[in-house]
């Protein structure tokens, strides 16, 4: 499995995703400025991976602070956090990391500064390991849906690269492979940004999974030929009723799955489920720059001045989703809201084993 | 409307489509070698347009022949025809043009050579005009399906550029515009070769039609939002039972149309209907080079060595098609086979007026 980010010898080591798949290179950061730069230049991407990078950025920023007491340390770590927050203002995972570490420092403000600094490092490694554990759990619950001889369709990149490891949509594939299952994967190239071609195809090849790249236009024809058995995708946000926001084109995959009687699974860590939002109708859809469509690697592929609609995401209604796979189990979309209640006996609503 | 190819002052004038949409330039050929070169280098593309280019190539080749009688002329025009045939061996329209002109010369072999040469020029212009007339007729029959306020989805390029003029899928749009209807068009970019982005968007802009470029991934989400009212596509081959082979991704559009209750129309000149083939199951699907998917304008977008499936076409079963629009009228796919019988009263099976 590809290692996207890890801590080594008081350095944050990150795969430079901007060079993939043409070049595999890692950058080693020994300052928080270096980590912030990597986040802002998109060398590291994917919500969970960004959260881990921010956590390790805080830890490495802490290491270089000289402070005689915790109060001074708190004052000095504050601009480190602000700097990281400013790299990508809309990335909720950076905000989440900053809040987690603020609390952590408050809780441990009785510790000597030197000990606190070490604890921050361990806590940032915890963030990474927790993410891997969540994804592994998703993989364990999800692998049951992949059978010998299957071909799995996936869309966009919800892979190891976007997380600490295992990915979300790819976790069931990696675990199924660890279980010795024989299957293959079709990766939609995922226009306009081609995350499927650039990232998913590459990381599945690295993991020894039999992957074939297809254009987004090919999924329907391949389903019609009986060449796809199930689809697994990730999600940016899933609402209380089981509606799934994910990369543009996911909804088309869902409709094609329905037409061909193919199950569609959504890998969703609990952190991506918004129990406060009733349905996908409320999710604002980001419109992105037309240049993502009209130019590819700086080469113009469409007429100057052409109008473009470039929605980053679409919403797949719950009725198209066979199951939502979380770290707590796989559930029917209609049962998803029950996870918000801590008293729910999950064993009664889980799908499969 | 864009003029793809025309005859002017004993020259064949062709739009250089390989430079679109970045540059609009025409080449003028006064020799058949020049025309053959334009065909083989894909400066001219699209089955009907290639047939017209081949016809004009034969005519311009004839002009430069000095022969004392028709027999000598026939001998000397033969290598011209062979040369054109060799430019793109699988292009049926070149074969069709060569056969048409062989017959034409045989029928008129009593004429003096100088007159025959002029007749060939007029005949090649006839080929162009006939194609335009067929497409205009498709447009007249098809325009009834476009209403004020509609948004029309199209896929790939079955436009003026692929024909002598009007195109097939675009003809109903151009005629509807001539009729003063207000509507807009969404053009799928059509990966992998991006004919929608490069050609369809460009030529509709040239014709003053309100066109918006979208990724193939966006069509479903836009249908779900109620932003698409009908789809019109072309066809490479339609079989007796109404199954439609067209650019890869057409089938996905068809399934999405069905899911949203959106009618799907196929513009098909009678020459593209294969009455000898029972169903689309018999159509061989061309697999093309993986580089079409893995590289874009020479820039690699996928990992070295990745497996690719790149089917050029897919087959949309007749049940997804609302009507097939020919130059003789619009018909339900189930009625299509009746067109093979010359005695059929078309007025009884035509859809609309």
Image: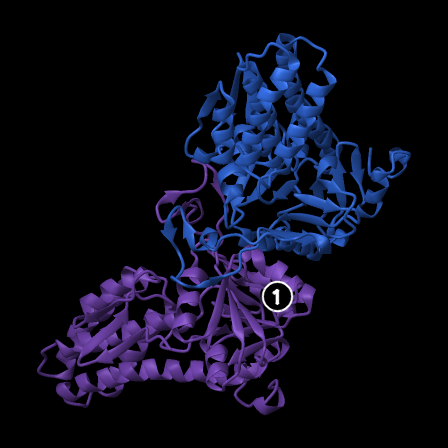
Chain colours: A purple, B blue
Residue drawn where x is 38% and y is 81% of the image: A132
Residue B270, percent from left and from top: 75, 36
Considering depth in this image, is A9 or B238 the residue closer to the camera?
B238
Determine whether, in the image, residue B89 is placed left or right of residue B245.
left
Residue B113, percent from left and from top: 63, 10
Residue B159, percent from left and from top: 60, 35
Residue drawn where x is 58% and y is 72% of the image: A242
Mark 1 sits on what residue? A317
Residue B310, percent from left and from top: 53, 56
Q: Is residue B314 visible?
A: yes
Residue drawn where x is 79% and y is 43% of the image: B275
Quadrant the C terminus of chain A occupies: bottom right
Q: Is residue B1 visible?
A: no
Q: In which quarter of the image is residue A107?
A: bottom left
Which chain's residue wears label 1? A
Considering depth in this image, is A256 or B327 the residue closer to the camera?
B327
Is residue B153 placed above or below B36 in the rendered structure? below
Determine whether, in the image, residue B240 is placed left or right of residue B48.
right
Is residue B213 placed above or below B295 in the rendered structure? above
Quadrant the N terminus of chain A occupies: bottom left
Is residue A3 placed above or below A299 in the rendered structure? below
Q: Residues within 10 Å of mark 1 (few under 14, many from 20)?
A: many
């Amino acid at each position: 499995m590809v290692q996207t980010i890890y801590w080594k010898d008081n350095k944050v080591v990150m795969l430079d995703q901007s060079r993939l798949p043409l070049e595999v290179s890692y950058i080693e950061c020994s300052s928080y400025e270096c980590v912030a730069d990597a986040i802002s230049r998109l060398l590291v991407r994917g919500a969970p991976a960004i959260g881990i990078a921010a956590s390790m950025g805080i830890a490495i920023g802490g290491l270089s602070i000289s402070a005689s007491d915790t109060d001074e340390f708190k004052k000095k770590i504050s601009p480190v956090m602000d700097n990281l927050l400013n790299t990508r203002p809309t990335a909720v995972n950076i905000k989440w990391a900053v809040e987690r570490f603020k609390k952590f420092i408050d809780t441990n403000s009785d510790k000597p500064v030197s000990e606190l600094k070490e604890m921050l490092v361990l806590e940032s490694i915890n963030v990474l390991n927790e993410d891997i554990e969540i994804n592994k759990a998703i993989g364990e619950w999800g692998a049951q849906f992949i059978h010998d001889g299957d071909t799995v369709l996936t869309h966009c990149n919800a892979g190891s690269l976007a997380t600490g490891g295992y990915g979300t949509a790819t976790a069931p594939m990696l675990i199924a492979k660890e279980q010795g299952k024989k299957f293959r994967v079709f990766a939609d190239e995922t226009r306009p940004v081609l995350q499927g071609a650039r990232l998913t195809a590459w990381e599945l090849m690295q993991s020894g999974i039999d992957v074939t790249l297809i254009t987004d236009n090919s999924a329907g024809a391949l389903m019609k030929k009986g060449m796809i058995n199930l689809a697994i995708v990730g999600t940016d946000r899933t609402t209380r009723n089981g509606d799934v926001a994910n990369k543009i084109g996911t909804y088309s995959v869902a409709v094609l799955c329905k037409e061909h009687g193919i199950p569609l699974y959504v890998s969703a860590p609990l952190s991506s489920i918004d129990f406060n939002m009733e349905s996908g109708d409320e999710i604002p859809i980001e419109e992105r720059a037309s240049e993502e469509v009209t130019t590819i690697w700086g080469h113009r592929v469409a007429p100057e001045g052409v109008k473009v609609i470039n929605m980053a995401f679409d919403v797949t209604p719950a009725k198209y989703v066979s199951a939502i796979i979380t770290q707590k189990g796989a559930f029917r979309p209609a049962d998803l809201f029950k996870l918000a209640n801590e008293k729910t006996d999950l064993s009664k609503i889980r799908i499969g084993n």
